[in-house]
Image (cartoon, grey):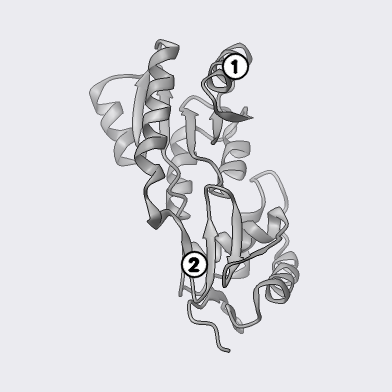
Amino acid sequence: MQVLLVEDEVMVARALSDALRKSGLAVDHAQDGEEAWYMAGTGQYAAIVLDIGLPRLDGMSVMKRLRSEGVATPILILSARGSWPERVAGINAGADDYLPKPFETEELLARVHGLIRRSSGNTAARLGGGGLEIDPASATVTVNGSPVELTQMEYRLLFHLVSHMGKVIGAAELAESLYSHNHERDTNAVEVLVGRLRRKIGKDFITTRRGFGYAFREQAES
């Protein structure tokens, strides 16, 4: 199981990463909110440990954006602000658990593993239709049971379309889902990626509405 740790304090991040690894988890680390949003957007993690007080983009904004994009990965919030109203605000924003600082490492480990156990049986976490399936836990894609090799950018674009199945999404929004905030959005790249995806998964899954954008269609034509 792989988790994403989002913590800007280097020493704290190092200690928590070591503890999580010793508990049997693989750990990726992000130091700021923009990096966290970009890494978590693939939905490949079993859980996210998210500090609220982050540079560039605060943790609450990261979480709200992920939830609005359809990322259902369990999120444990870490915050020095532990009052009841703040905890309720965090849960309402999409957090699955809230751990105020300071905390014991053993409690964090217990909460993370608890989140993973509770979500591991959730088959609804798999996305897709019409023979195409995305498994966010492993960031893999299959079509009629056969694995499809995608680049990270192709996967992110497909994940965003499937998460909003049936909705027509403009190229600008799709480009925004591909790049972190400090990168220039290239809508031309969206057209290129859609073409590559059609060659890999089949041409009928992604439809084009000229002048409007693209949509994932659950039932591909034979």
Which residue shows up at 45% across the image and 41% down it?
63
Residue hosting label 2: 128
Which residue shows up at 58% across the image and 18% down it?
13
Q: Is residue 119 left or right of residue 59?
A: left
58 or 100, which lies in front? 100
Percent of width and height locating residue 113: 42, 29
63 lies above or below 109 = below
Q: Which mark is residue 7?
A: none
Q: Amino acid at mark 2?
A: Gly
52 or 155, which lies in front? 155
80 or 222, which lies in front? 222
Q: Name which quarter of the figure residue 30 lies in.
A: top right
Q: Residue furthest front?
A: 145
Q: Residues within 10 Å of mark 2 (few under 14, many from 20)?
A: many
Which residue shows up at 65% across the image and 78% down it?
202
Q: Residues within 10 Å of mark 1 (few under 14, many from 20)?
A: some
Percent of width and height locating residue 122: 37, 50
Q: Is residue 130 left or right of residue 149?
A: left
